[in-house]
Image (tube, rainbow, N blue to C red):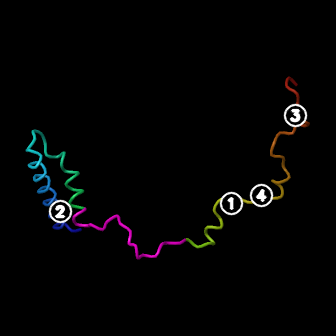
Amino acid sequence: MNKAEFAALDARIAARVEQMWEAAGSPHGPRDRFFDEARALIGMEENPMAGTIDPDAKPFVAEASLMRNLGEFPSVSDAQAEEPSFPDPENEKPSGE
């Protein structure tokens, strides 16, 4: 978006803010409270299909080779497999020694 397009968009949003403020009965206080809603409405008018999914588009399907690795744990080396994974009561010293 170039500078001129941005200025035009700002002008459209400002006009919508003014329109919304007048439609609300010209309440006392700043018109800024209408800015976010006006910007969203202008965006929806200019891009009515934004956020929708094309029903004719083919869905993205990940390759099976990529999915195969989901949930796997790293392999354990032979040296790690021989080490106990819990305390061995026979090798523990009694407390107080």
Say which quadrant the C terminus sits in. top right
Residue 78: % across, % down: 83, 58
Residue 52: % across, % down: 35, 66
Q: Alpha-carbon distance for marks 4 and 2?
A: 60 Å
Going 85% across and 25% down the picture, which residue do you hit?
95
Q: Mark 4 = which residue?
A: 76
Going 65% across and 59% down the picture, which residue do you hit?
71
Going 47% across and 72% down the picture, which residue do you hit?
59
Specify the label residue 92 is tagged with.
3
Q: Quadrant of residue 89?
A: top right
Residue lying furthest front: 55
Pick whichever of labels 1 and 3 is earlier in the sequence. 1
Q: Residues within 10 Å of mark 2 (few under 14, many from 20)?
A: some
Asked if the residue at tag 4 contacts the one at tag 3, i.e. Cβ–Cβ closer than 8 Å, the answer is no
Say which quadrant the N terminus sits in. bottom left
Asked if the residue at tag 2 contacts the one at tag 1, i.e. Cβ–Cβ closer than 8 Å, the answer is no
Pick whichever of labels 3 and 2 is earlier in the sequence. 2
Q: Alpha-carbon distance for marks 1 and 2?
A: 51 Å
Q: Alpha-carbon distance for marks 1 and 3?
A: 34 Å
The span picked out in magenta is: 44-61
Label 1 sits on a secondary structure element that is loop
Q: Main secondary structure of the magenta part?
A: loop
Specify the label residue 72 is tagged with.
1
Q: Mark 2 = which residue?
A: 9
Residue 73: % across, % down: 70, 58
Q: Amino acid at mark 4?
A: Val
Q: Amino acid at mark 1?
A: Glu
Q: Quadrant of residue 77?
A: bottom right
Label 3 sits on a secondary structure element that is loop
Residue lying furthest right: 90
